[in-house]
Image: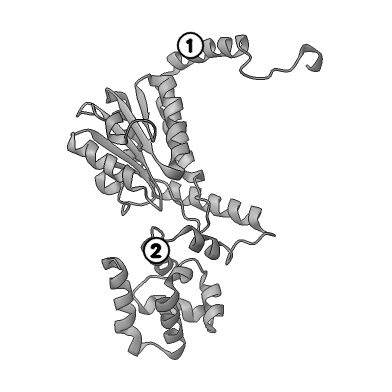
Amino acid sequence: MDNEKQDLMRIIQVKFPRLSKGQKLIAEYILKHYDKAAFMTAAKLGTSVGVSESTVVRFANELGYSGYPTLQKALQELIKNKLTTVQRIELSNDFISEENALKGVLKSDMENIRATLEKINHKTFEDVVKSIFEAKTIYIIGLRSSTALAEFLGFYLNIILDNVKVVGYGISDIFEQMLNVSEEDLVIGIGFPRYANRTIEALTFAQSRSAKVVAITDSLLSPLAAQADFTLIAQSNMASFVDSLVAPLSVINALIIAVGLREKEKISTIFTNLEGIWEEYNVYTYKSKDDR
């Protein structure tokens, strides 16, 4: 049990004698089922315990939080990196059913993007764009579910800049692919709960070589952020067996576009050439003249 969890649980235990009868029921439920409580609304938690929603809000205030959302966020921060896939499936059943899966997931993704827009530091974003142009070589690493994000970012940046290397599992080890990383280079690490240990190790290795490190992750408390010079926050809160990568992908899209806007003429030339290649080698299906 980590120190943060101990601190939160300790607060509940210390304040327990002074809590009202209803608040004690909430406290007991959280102590036993904090993993489930973290993803319940105040109304849902109240129903599960048998108290009113207002009692849940007063309970959060009694613990020193400004409101229930703040307490809920604290609980989520504690457990999100510890949830197994099975636990995520069980928790998702509490707020997403077969009947409302589409609506529930889309609303969750919209909330993730909204929260990302509020949390992300615009100056840091500009510093990252600047660092991309200053780097001799750009290494991008994202493993497990973040592999798709790393490949996407690497594909488009390499079209624009031609000095990008996506690091991933293959014949060679991660560190062999980063053997020549130096202080002239930039390493971009992408990772979300549950964080891949190898990504964290790669960023630590990059730091040891004095390379500049950027983390694209969900929180400044993320282990990736601890190894980074710059951290771009993209919220990915979703208690299900599928990681929500919508907000992270939006941030990555913004990075690609920001880089592209500084290389407009080069991009125009590149894509003019690509269009010719795509048409010559039938890369895409085009409508016949009869269909136009």
Q: Is residue 118 above or below residue 183?
A: below
- Tag 1 or tag 2, which sits nearer the N-term? 2
Q: Nearer the viewer, residue 108 or 119?
A: 108
Q: Position of residue 202 (x, y in %)?
A: 28, 39
Q: Residue drawn at (32%, 82%), measured in percent from left and top?
A: 13
Q: Position of residue 126 (x, y in %)?
A: 34, 34
* Colour style of the rendered protein structure: one colour
- Determine the secondary structure under disc 1: helix
Q: Nearer the viewer, residue 77 or 43?
A: 77
The answer for how far apart the CA atoms under marks 2 and 1 are is: 49 Å
Which numbered mark, 2 or 1, is in the foreground of this view? 2
Q: Nearer the viewer, residue 229 or 67?
A: 229
Q: Tags 2 and 1 in contact by the CB under 8 Å rule?
A: no
Q: Report if residue 259 is visible in the image.
A: yes
The tally of labels here is 2
Q: Position of residue 194 (x, y in %)?
A: 40, 53
Left or right: residue 192 compared with residue 286: left
**Which residue reaches farthest front?**
171
Binning the other alpha carbons within 10 Å of mark 1 as few (below 14), some (14 to 19) or many (20 upward) gives few
Disc number for residue 269: 1
Left or right: residue 156 compared with residue 122: right
Q: Residue drawn at (38%, 70%), measured in percent from left and top?
A: 66
